[in-house]
Amino acid sequence: MTDTRLKTLDALEAQIAASDETARAALMPRLRALVTELEAEGLLPPGSARAHLTDAVDDALDDQFDNMPI
């Protein structure tokens, strides 16, 4: 079962890498769910998956400040 999740995670990461910003944002909930499932099994998700999630949070924070008056 874990091998299946890891293969799914690899495919999802490839899809994220090939996607535009809007599509990437739509894929993040699935990535977050896979990472959470792996962590629940006591496994350490790949650093690249965690990096994608961190980037998504950073992008969301940046978006909040884009229209902030100075």
Image (cartoon, rainbow, N blue to C red):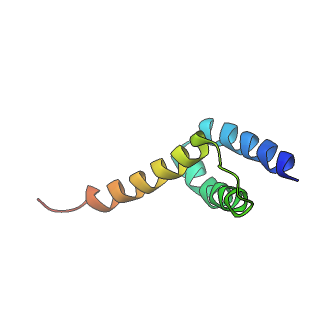
Which residue appears at 80% of the width and 50% of the height? 5
Quadrant where the image shows the C terminus: bottom left
Tell me if 27 is positioned left or right of 65 in this view.
right
Residue situated in front as seen by the camera: 17 or 3: 3
Spot the residue most to the right: 1
Residue 29 against residue 48 in the figure, above or below:
below
Where residue 56 sits in the image (x, y, percent)?
48, 52
Residue 52 against residue 64 in the figure, above or below:
above
Which residue appears at 80% of the width and 42% of the height? 7
Residue situated in front as seen by the camera: 68 or 12: 12
Q: Quadrant of residue 69?
A: bottom left
Where residue 48 sits in the image (x, y, percent)?
58, 40
| Number of numbered discs | 0
Which residue appears at 62% of the width and 59% of the height? 32
Where residue 4 sits in the image (x, y, percent)?
86, 48
Residue 2 against residue 40 in the figure, above or below:
above
Tell me if 62 is positioned left or right of 47 in this view.
left
Spot the residue most to the front: 42
Q: Quadrant of residue 68?
A: bottom left
Where residue 33 sits in the image (x, y, percent)?
68, 62
Tell me if 47 is positioned left or right of 62 in this view.
right
Which residue appears at 77% of the width and 45% of the height? 6
Residue situated in front as seen by the camera: 8 or 69: 8
